[in-house]
Image (cartoon, rainbow, N blue to C red):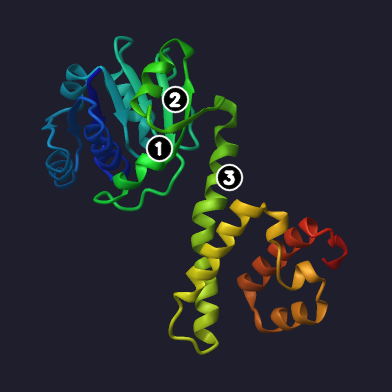
Amino acid sequence: MRIGFIGAGKVGCSLGKYFVNTGIDVAGYFCKNTTSLEFATEFTNTKKFETAQSLTDASDIIFLTVPDSQIAVVYESIKTNEKIFVHCSGALSSTVFYDNIYGYSLHPFMAINDKRCSYKQLGTANFTLEGNEEKIHLIKNLVKNNEVYIISAENKPLYHASAVFASNFSVALGAIATELLQKSGFTNTDIIFDIMENNIKNMKSSGIINSLTGPVARGDIDTIKKHMSVLHSDELEIYKLLSKKLAELAGKGDLF
């Protein structure tokens, strides 16, 4: 089965490189951005296609690695029941391929932030997959060296919200923690990443509840009040909301 990519961004480049490295036949790419197209084809040593239709004709499985809002638009321009279509959106399901029974969504459960390097991490990534059962094994086989979880179409938004909390929001929390540390006089803010990394290890090895520490877990109202006295605006609201969740986990719901 030959794979073709429409879209040459971070996900398209990373998956294409990963597929090539694992022995999968990648036909090449089509992308309206000529700079991205040049990079993708050189990066994966595959063919550059001049149109989306010519790539579709040359491929058995077409990956639409374009922004979520463009998946249906691109599909509409090349749709055919003779091909298998796949997108990599975490939130959208295969129903975006509304009149093709062989449509699938394959989502890597990891942060792909670098089109040059992220492919190296895909070997240990988990994937979620949903779509028509008849040929789902063909898509699963593309990442046969990975853990693949089958998910239902209706659960995609909730699943993706989980990923946003775990990945994107941790970046926001890292940014807030870094800013507060800088305000307190620190120049070396890398210690923020050390404490975050250590906490992740604790949750993975000991579980979420057993990893609870800090003033909320101890029921230390005086310290909590001190924190709230120096926080302002959004920082204060985020502190309150997250502390409320921590209090719930610690069985101290009466604190907030």
Specify few, some or many for label 2: CA neighbours under 10 Å numbering under 14, 14-19, or 20 or more.
some
Percent of width and height locating residue 239: 67, 69
Relative depth, front residue between 17 and 224:
17
Specify few, some or many for label 3: CA neighbours under 10 Å numbering under 14, 14-19, or 20 or more.
few
**Mark 2 or mark 3, which is nearer to you?**
3
Q: Quadrant of residue 229?
A: bottom right
Work out which quarter of the rendered image holds the C terminus and state it. bottom right
List the residue tagged with mark 3. 162
Q: CA distance from mark 1 to mark 2?
A: 10 Å
Relative depth, front residue between 220 and 229:
220
- Asked whether residue 158 is in view, the answer is yes
List the residue tagged with mark 2. 96
- Asked whether residue 175 is in view, the answer is no
Task: State the SS at label 1.
Answer: helix
Which amino acid lies under the numbered mark 3 shown in the image of this protein?
Ser
Task: Give the residue at the far right of this rendering.
Answer: 254
Q: Is residue 126 above or below residue 113?
A: above
Tally of numbered discs = 3
Relative depth, front residue between 229 and 247:
247
Q: Quadrant of residue 196?
A: bottom right
Residue at 82% across / 77% down in the picture? Answer: 221
Specify few, some or many for label 1: CA neighbours under 10 Å numbering under 14, 14-19, or 20 or more.
few
Percent of width and height locating residue 89: 43, 36
Task: State the SS at label 2.
Answer: helix
Residue at 53% across / 41% down in the picture? Answer: 160
Whichever of labels 3 and 1 marks the residue nearer the N terminus, that label is: 1
List the residue tagged with mark 1. 69
Which amino acid lies under the numbered mark 2 shown in the image of this protein?
Val
Q: CA distance from mark 2 to mark 3?
A: 21 Å
Q: Would residue 13 be found to the left or right of residue 214 on screen?
A: left
Q: Are marks 2 and 3 in contact (CB under 8 Å)?
A: no
